[in-house]
Amino acid sequence: MSKIGFWLQRIAQLLIVLLLVTFGVSLLLRLIPVDLATILLPVGTETERDILRNELGFNKGPIGYYLQWLGNFVQGDFGKIYFSGGTEEVSDHLKNAMPRSLLLMTYTQVLALAIAIPLGVLSAYRAGRRADKIISNTLFA
């Protein structure tokens, strides 16, 4: 199998797993004993809850709800944060958190490499000796 075929197969497997996991989570949301509209609008009227159910797609059945969510997700609509009154978009929070997350990831990778490369060189230089065994057992434990 060629490298391109291998990577295409891996990407296809990843997409299948993501679809199955997100569909499973959407099914689990429907198994909650309390209606999600009641959780999100505890002091709202029944009419307001019906509007929220319609907006979220809970009245469409499990597959319709999932397809609506998936369509919104693909278009970049990640929804609203309802615990803040439903006025804040999830995408706005992602945009604010992404630079900090990328910076933290970069620092973590630099630190990991700064530790791993010298220990790897030391372990290779002292292969089979006590230092190699200590490094290997510590890092792989």
Image (spheres, helix red, strand yellow):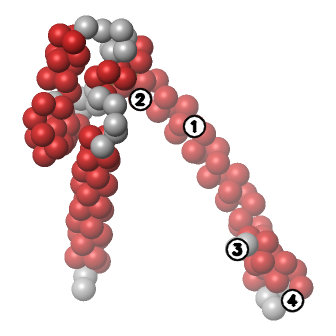
Q: Nearer the viewer, mark 2 or mark 4?
A: 2
Name the residue at the bottom extreme: 128
Q: Nearer the viewer, mark 1 or mark 2?
A: 2
* Residue on which the image places disc 2: 94
Provide the secondary structure element on which disc 4 rests. Answer: loop
Q: Quadrant of residue 46?
A: top left
Q: Is residue 115 left or right of residue 89?
A: right
Quarter of the figure with the N terminus: bottom left
Viewer-nearest residue: 75 or 131:
75
- Cα gap from disc 2 to disc 4, whole angstroms: 48 Å
Provide the secondary structure element on which disc 1 rests. Answer: helix
- Cα gap from disc 2 to disc 3, whole angstroms: 34 Å
Residue type at the position of mark 1 = Leu
| Looking at the image, residue 33 lies above or below residue 19 | above
User: Residue placed at 47% from the left, 32% from the top?
Assistant: 98
Viewer-nearest residue: 71 or 45:
45
Mark 4 Cα-neighbour bin, 10 Å: few <14, some 14–19, many ≥20: few
Q: Is residue 133 visible?
A: yes
The label number, if any, that marks residue 129 in the structure image: 4
The label number, if any, that marks residue 140 in the structure image: 3
Residue type at the position of mark 2 = Leu
Provide the secondary structure element on which disc 3 rests. Answer: loop
Residue type at the position of mark 3 = Phe
- Cα gap from disc 4 to disc 3, whole angstroms: 16 Å
Residue type at the position of mark 4 = Arg
